[in-house]
Image (cartoon, rainbow, N blue to C red):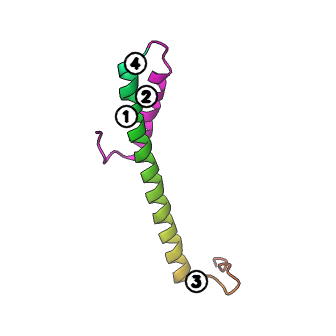
Amino acid sequence: MGNPDIGYADALSELQQILGELEAEDIDIDVLAMKVGRAAELIRVCRGRINDAEVRVKEIVAGLDHEQGGPSPSGESEPCP
């Protein structure tokens, strides 16, 4: 398995490199299987990083709403001053 601590940018870069290699017409079938497996690992890493960022952003926005007194009774948040 690869490094689970790889960052999003590094994972995406490696994934793009693998994609370029997979597009080569003369790729060995054994190498193909290995590269596809690694690409799947990298996709999981990228999805995890995106999900983590989404959760964090929602937490930050919820914190801001809480600091401002939350959403208005109509369900819409008040405009920022």
Q: Which numbered disc flags the more N-terminal residue, 4 or 2?
A: 2
Figure check: 54 above or below 6? below
State if disc 1 and disc 4 touch (CB < 8 Å).
Answer: no
Separation (CA) of disc 4 from disc 3: 57 Å
Q: Image quadrant for the C terminus?
A: bottom right
Provide the residue designation for mark 1: 38
Report the Cα–Cα distance between label 4 and label 1. Answer: 14 Å
SS at circle 3: loop
**Residue 11 placement (x, y as % from top left):** 40, 40
Q: Position of residue 1 (x, y in %)?
A: 28, 39
Question: Residue 35 sits in which quadrant?
Answer: top left
Q: Position of residue 15 (x, y in %)?
A: 44, 34
Q: For mark 3, what is the residue?
A: 70
Residue at image mark 2: 18
Residue mark closest to the camera, 4 vs 3: 4
What type is the residue that disc 1 sits on?
Arg
Nearer mark to the viewer, of 4 and 2: 4
Residue type highlighted by circle 3: Gly
Residue at 47% x, 57% y is 51
**Distance CA(mark 1)–CA(mark 2):** 8 Å
Image-based side of 79 in relation to 64, left or right: right
Which residue does the image show at 42% across and 30% down from the upper left?
Answer: 36
Q: Secondary structure at mark 1?
A: helix
**Residue at the spot of label 4:** 29
Alpha carbon distance from label 1 to label 3: 44 Å
Say which of marks 4 and 1 sits in front.
4
